Amino acid sequence: MPLDTAVRQQRMKAWTPILHPVWVIVTLLAIGALFVPLGLRFRAISDGVVEYVIKYDGDGHGDWNCNIGGNCTLNFTIEENMEEGVMVYYQIENFHQNHREYETSRDDKQLLGSLKQDDLQAAQCDPLNKLGNITLNPCGLIANTFFNDVITFVPTPEQALEQIQLTEDGIAWNSDLDFKFSQPDGFKFEPCDDCNDCVCESPEWSCTEKHVDSDGNCYKYFYPNDDTTQYLHETYNSISPIVGVTDEHFIVWMRIAAHPTFRKLYGYFENGFKAGDTVTFEIENNWIVDSFKGSKSLVITTTSAFGGKSDQLGGCFIGVGGICLLAGVFFALKHSFKPRKLADEKYLKYKVE
């Protein structure tokens, strides 16, 4: 026997709203009156974002053709002031990262440093798990189609004097950096006091020659099973062996996009630019787009509270608000000229047996 409670005995108080025409009309007009101004405001915020795009490779690249394996220079002429916090993105068109076989082609334990791989993880990475007897680390389609174009900011003398730099740190999610990517178990490195004495001849180190970073610092390093494994820095020259899979450009690439046309953050300027400035980038073009009939673009843009430049949010609010206003006016006219009595019995239909 159920307990004698309101819930068990179905004695809960209930409220059944009746859709009275007046309340429906007022609600529709109120929604429209709220949504349309909000949509216009969102559209104005989006219009305040300053954005410049140059397509430099692929179909319809115009005068900015960059040959694969070569370098080219892109010049952005700034026509409107760009406030502090200018973002630099690369944009890919017609590349489906959300394809099921593509997005599952990875070994998350391997990306976190594990050197052990079971049959299921190996199958997920096929056909890019091994090349003959050489193991790919990291394996899979995502890691081995990494966007490896190198984008370098070339400052003018005035910009160099103002110390304007393209910052490439802090572009990946902290959760990815802390919990999803780590160098292989057993990896180690050591900075050298003197580059001239920095040698990798000891069995303690797997490097064939020292690594020199952009600041001129020298390192020696050790990767486990290096003779039977091809690591990320051996696949892509743009990846430092000291950083490996913790390279932020690689981590950004590994967070797949939902649409075939997408942008990924490459870096940012803490300073802004003034109207009339020229912003120059040198591109080392390595990533091939002809095989999938795609294209590559470089984007520099400011941001707003809602992200980059997009009219979709404002357009949705204006569209919904406009429809509600039209419906409210229509029902108001209908109710004014030909009102309908609430619960009028003549509209009831009974099924007669």
Image: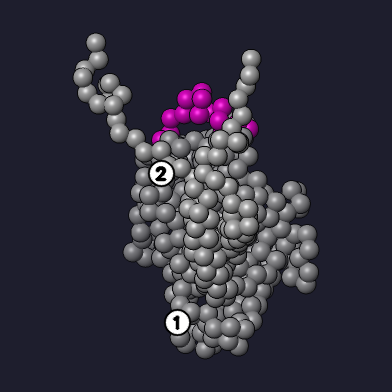
Q: Nearer the viewer, residue 230 or 142?
A: 142
Looking at the image, the residue that sits furthest to the left is 4
Residue at image point 64% right, 78% down: 76
The picture places residue 179, in percent across and down from the top left corner, at 36, 45
Q: Position of residue 103 (x, y in %)?
A: 57, 39
Residue 160 vertical position relative to residue 173 in the rendered view, above or below? below
Q: Position of residue 68 (x, y in %)?
A: 72, 59
**Which of the two marks, 1 or 2, is nearer to us in this view?**
2
In the picture of the structure, the residue carrying the numbered disc 2 is 180
Q: Residue furthest top?
A: 1
Which residue is pictured at 41% across the width and 44% down the height? Answer: 180
What kind of element bears circle 1?
Answer: loop
Name the residue: 28% across, 21% down: 9
Q: Secondary structure at mark 2?
A: loop
Position of residue 71 in the picture relative to residue 230 (left or right): right
Type of residue at label 2?
A: Lys
User: Which label sits on residue 78?
Assistant: none
Q: Is residue 201 left or right of residue 119?
A: left
Residue 148 picture location, percent across and down: 60, 56
In the rendered image, the quadrant that contains the C terminus is top right
Q: Counting other residues with Cα less than 10 Å from the Cα at mark 1, is it few (<14), some (14-19), or many (20 or more)?
A: few
Residue 274 shows up from this direction: yes
Q: Nearer the viewer, residue 334 or 314?
A: 334
Quarter the N terminus occupies = top left
Tag 1 and tag 2, C-beta contact below 8 Å: no
Closer to the N terminus: mark 1 or mark 2? 1
The residue that disc 1 covers is 163
Q: Point out the stretch of residues depicted in magenta.
A: 114-128
Can residue 239 be seen in this snapshot? no
Q: Amino acid at mark 1?
A: Gln
Indicate yes or no whether the magenta region holds residue 126. yes
